[in-house]
Image: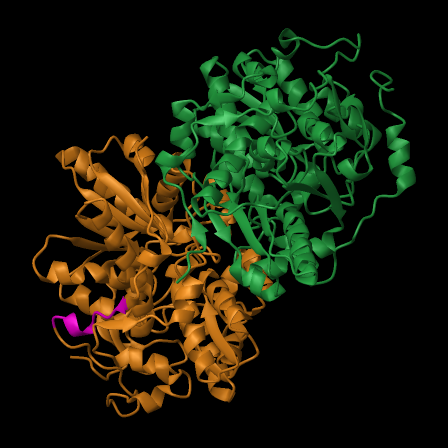
Chain colours: A orange, B green
């Protein structure tokens, strides 16, 4: 019997996160103060983030040690298995080998606890009692509820309203770990009240929810804010995924040709791919493919420009691919991919053509997810289905070209809390949104003038 | 960093199931024909089961080889990890060591695929095109849908009506794997129509759903029936759980003092404990503790008598602890534990005092589940919460008695599809049913005279 899973022991778990910043082809454009257009210093972030994380945000150190307390909690589910999708390969009749890194085995069911736990830890260490955050599909909110609970902290989650109603079980999961969940836009914050005044039926968006969570944190002394993606320190924590994958591939003597991940804010993709970047930069032929929904085509249709991270324009400006901070994507089931921007670190690589990006509508993604569930067993999250779609398409290309490539994708999460989306798919009710170019152009008109060429 | 998980490689996976029959202290009373009171032969079971499974049902061979095709599918998630619940131990301040065998990592989220896969395999081998079954909480129905899908067979699931409405995501999961799900009692069968005529609002029960599934299978040439628990061959397949656990404990040089599992029909408990039986029979002090709900107290309050396996009296008579085949337990959230009887193999051990049984109401079980989720991370299934409650109580006893015992329980499944029950628990809406003695006495009046002393 051939082994289809590669395990690492807890002793073999990486002891440091990989920071890509010193290895970038050019320096990362700094976040700017929207008023002055000048780079912001750490003090500007201090009201909403602890110093431990602000330091990581700007660090130029290649390796950053993972604290023992974090390692011990990682040990509840890490190292996660790397699996060969043999039955999927057979179904596709592909000569390619398909592997997936199974991040769905975490208690919250996704890669998100990889950063939720250290974020809770660094906040706790500096005396913070309460964290606020936003969540789309609920993956991040449940991860932070889980993380806060382990350090005895309160967790207030603003959940995008459309997902709040689509995914009641996610709310219950957060509450099981002690989280407090409010549908966003809410009347709890000024940002929320403003949106509701304009559109009482607003489905919400990650941008709006971020505004609410940031406002809440800025208002209270005992509270800080926590972001589940986009920022450098979040991507840093997620590199545990790629570092383990690298060790696992080495263990079986396999070299990857293509690495694939879905992109919302970009953290699972970056955490998965970045540890392979030094080899790629040194000339090794590894393709990084980011997969996003056509309903929110940030990397494939957005502009690389300075923009706000949130709708209410309360964050610093970040240099990234953006559809405009007023962009509100339709309520697709992959709620975690509904973000108007993406991680600046990732966008720099995209701009430098060191990675590729593709976009898919939701029906072909669910088709891919169904094939995966019916061959490999696990039911994928709608977000993850995007990575699977791209992996399958690459594998089919290998069949046509008779190429024995090694395709590795990040199985970012399971779909146990997203079954209603499978129900909708199976009954033919899913709409494929191709976002109209003119609508994108319209929301791009609102980009701040600062940093525009 | 101390390892908290014990893995086996796929190569180390057991190659044969353990059959307890030759090691029993006395022969198992045979199933009887309800009309004649005589033992039934294989030919009586042939209309609803394939010969491969009927042979296993009566086999006296101690070891039965696991077919390669089954091993290969087991490899999608097996061997499952054995985990040390360090954080739970710390929360309980117990000197005891608590381990759990994590069966929740299977695609269906429980131990059920361990038998669904071989059952589909043996049916397929004999040309069967379609399987019918019943399901309570939906764990079994989803496992059989998963198993049938892998062998290209149809799967018709009769789902206990109260669970069908409580757990829509479970239905969607079955459908994702291609299963067809009907709430039971249904108008699809005579058995269902009879119940509906008496009580159109019947919440259903496993007993009724079994009647429907058996009738459906008996009616169609291409169809056989599949049972998720109770029968000898089902318990046999589940011994993979205990065999792995044994190998894992040996690997770390740990000897178990107490083995704990929840009991509905008894298959997860038996599969977990039976492989340790030869040592126990040889005089080693290992306690087996079965945990059931007070709402359906089969082992703790039932009689050890011949009874029907289903409500419509269509099955052979089985010698088991029973609350009477007309017993319909209240709609507790642990739907998988709502069965009036239990596995004859298990009941024989109980009658011979080779195992213990305890019963808990649902609130203390959910308290235990919450503590587990908040220390170890994973959210347990309501069924599994019963095993956790008992494990915690034993660990607390160890604290009081200053005993460093090794407690191992079977974490039979996760609660991702049962979040509504956590919602009900957290909002104080769960009722603790202690089934009234007089009601039990009443349903016991309906026991068949055959085999009564």
Q: Is residue A428 at all visible to an observer of this figure?
A: no
Q: Quadrant of the C terminus of chain B?
A: top right
Residues rendered magenta in the picture: A17-25
Image quadrant where residue B46 sits: top right
Q: Note whether residue B451 is visible.
A: yes
Looking at this view, name the residue that lies furthest to the front: B283
B445 relative to B70 in the view: left or right: right
- In the rendered image, residue A115, in percent from the top left (x then y), is placed at 39, 67
Q: Is residue A244 above or below residue B328?
A: below
Front residue of A349/B316: it is B316
Looking at the rendered structure, the number of numbered marks drawn on it comes to 0
Query: Within the magenta stretch, is there residue B181?
Result: no
- Where B26 sits versus B301, above or below? above
Left or right of residue B131, residue A6 in this image: left
Question: Which of these two is toward me, B146 or A147?
Answer: A147
Left or right, residue B125 beside residue A407 = right
Is residue A382 positioned above or below A33 on the image? above
Residue furthest left in the image = A283
Q: If the image is split into quadrants, where does the N terminus of chain B sit?
A: bottom left
Q: Residue A294: x percent and y percent? A: 31, 55
Q: Residue B304 placed where, x, y %?
A: 80, 28
Where is residue B133 shown, x and y percent of the image? 61, 27
The answer to which of A80 and A417 lies nearer the viewer is A80
């Amino acid at each position: 019997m051939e082994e289809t899973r590669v395990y690492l022991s807890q002793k073999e778990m990486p002891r440091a996160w990989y920071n890509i910043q010193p290895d970038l082809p050019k320096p990362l454009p700094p976040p700017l103060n929207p008023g002055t257009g000048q780079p912001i210093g750490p003090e500007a972030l201090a009201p909403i983030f602890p110093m431990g994380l602000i330091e990581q945000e700007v660090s130029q150190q290649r390796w950053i040690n993972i604290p023992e307390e974090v390692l011990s909690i990682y040990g509840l589910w890490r190292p996660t298995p790397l699996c060969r999708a043999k039955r999927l390969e057979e179904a596709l009749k592909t000569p390619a080998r398909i592997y997936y890194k199974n991040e769905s085995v975490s208690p919250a069911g996704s890669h998100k606890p990889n950063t939720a736990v250290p974020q809770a830890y660094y906040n706790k260490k500096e005396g913070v009692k309460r964290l606020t955050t936003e969540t789309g599909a609920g993956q991040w909110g449940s991860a932070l509820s889980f993380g806060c609970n382990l350090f005895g902290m309160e967790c207030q989650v603003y959940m995008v309203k459309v997902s709040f109603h689509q995914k009641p079980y996610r709310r219950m999961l957060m509450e099981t770990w002690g989280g407090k969940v409010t549908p966003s836009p809410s009347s709890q914050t000024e940002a929320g009240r403003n949106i509701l005044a304009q559109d009482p039926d607003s489905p919400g968006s990650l941008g709006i929810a971020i505004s609410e969570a940031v406002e809440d944190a800025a208002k209270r002394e005992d509270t800080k804010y926590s972001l589940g993606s986009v920022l450098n320190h979040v991507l840093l924590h997620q590199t545990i995924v790629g570092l383990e994958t690298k060790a696992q591939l080495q263990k079986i003597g396999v070299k990857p040709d293509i690495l694939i991940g879905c992109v919302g804010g970009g953290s699972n993709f970056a955490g998965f791919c970045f540890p392979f970047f030094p080899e790629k930069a040194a000339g090794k032929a590894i393709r990084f493919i980011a997969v996003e929904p056509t309903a929110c085509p940030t990397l494939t249709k957005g502009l690389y420009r300075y923009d706000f991270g949130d709708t209410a324009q309360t964050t610093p400006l970040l240099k990234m691919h953006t559809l405009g901070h007023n962009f509100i994507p339709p309520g697709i089931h992959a709620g975690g991919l509904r973000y108007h921007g993406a991680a600046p670190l990732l966008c720099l690589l995209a701009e430098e053509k060191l990675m590729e990006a593709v976009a898919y509508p939701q029906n072909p993604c669910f088709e891919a997810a169904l094939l995966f569930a019916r061959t490999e067993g696990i039911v994928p999250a709608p977000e993850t289905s995007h990575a699977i779609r791209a992996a399958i398409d690459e594998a089919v290309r290998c069949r046509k070209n008779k190429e024995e490539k090694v395709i590795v994708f990040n199985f970012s999460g399971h779909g146990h809390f997203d079954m209603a989306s499978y129900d909708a798919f199976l009954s033919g009710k899913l709409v494929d949104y191709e976002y109209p170019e003119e609508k994108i152009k319209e929301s791009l008109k609102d980009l701040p003038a600062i940093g525009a060429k």
